[in-house]
Amino acid sequence: MAYSSGMLLERVAVMVRDDEQSGDFGRSSAGRKYRYAATFQTAFDFNRGTKSLREGAVDGYDRVMFRMRYNKVVDRNSMLVYKGKTYQIESFNADWRQNTIQITAVETPGQDLTSLLPQPTSSVPETPAEPELEPTTL
């Protein structure tokens, strides 16, 4: 099922692995580095309770689910930043025919990637301060 814009109410930042660490034998696992790639609209849901039991999760209390439109930026090695928390992807199901991606992720409290996010800029120009007027007596 394709997701309508009314379902995708949240925003998630996608961090992709930097490939500068790769060598002759593939990617290095030591010192993984990430960079900001894009921000996507998403639907966020906690994967808990009977829903998680139906899906076969044994310890699904700390799992979350992201749903978004299909794109080529997100992959299994990406990290997601949502509301200041960093999530590692556990399962990744992309279907370009239905224009959907469904991701199950777990929070990684030891890894903070929020410092890599672009800083918001103000679109309102600063107004110059008005000059102070000297009091006059009549």
Image (tube, rainbow, N blue to C red):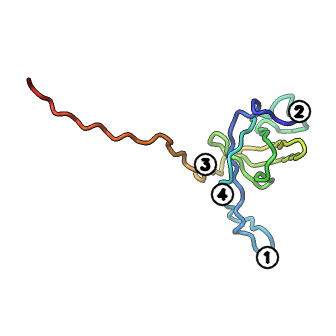
In the foreground, 41 or 131: 131
Name which of mark 4 and mark 3 comes first in the sequence. Answer: 4
Q: Residue at x 77, y 67 (%)?
A: 27
* Relative side of 65 to 12, left or right: right
Which mark's residue is nearer the viewer, 1 or 4?
A: 4
Q: Secondary structure at mark 3?
A: helix
Q: CA distance from mark 4 to mark 2?
A: 34 Å
Q: Which residue is mark 4?
A: 35
Q: Are marks 1 and 3 in contact (CB under 8 Å)?
A: no
Q: Which residue is mark 1?
A: 24
Q: CA distance from mark 3 to mark 2?
A: 32 Å
Which mark's residue is nearer the viewer, 3 or 2?
A: 3
Q: Quadrant of the N terminus?
A: top right
Q: Secondary structure at mark 4?
A: strand
> Looking at the rendered structure, which numbered label has been put on residue 53?
2
Q: Secondary structure at mark 1?
A: loop
Question: Is 113 rendered above or below residue 131?
Answer: below
Looking at the rendered structure, the kind of residue marked 2 is Leu
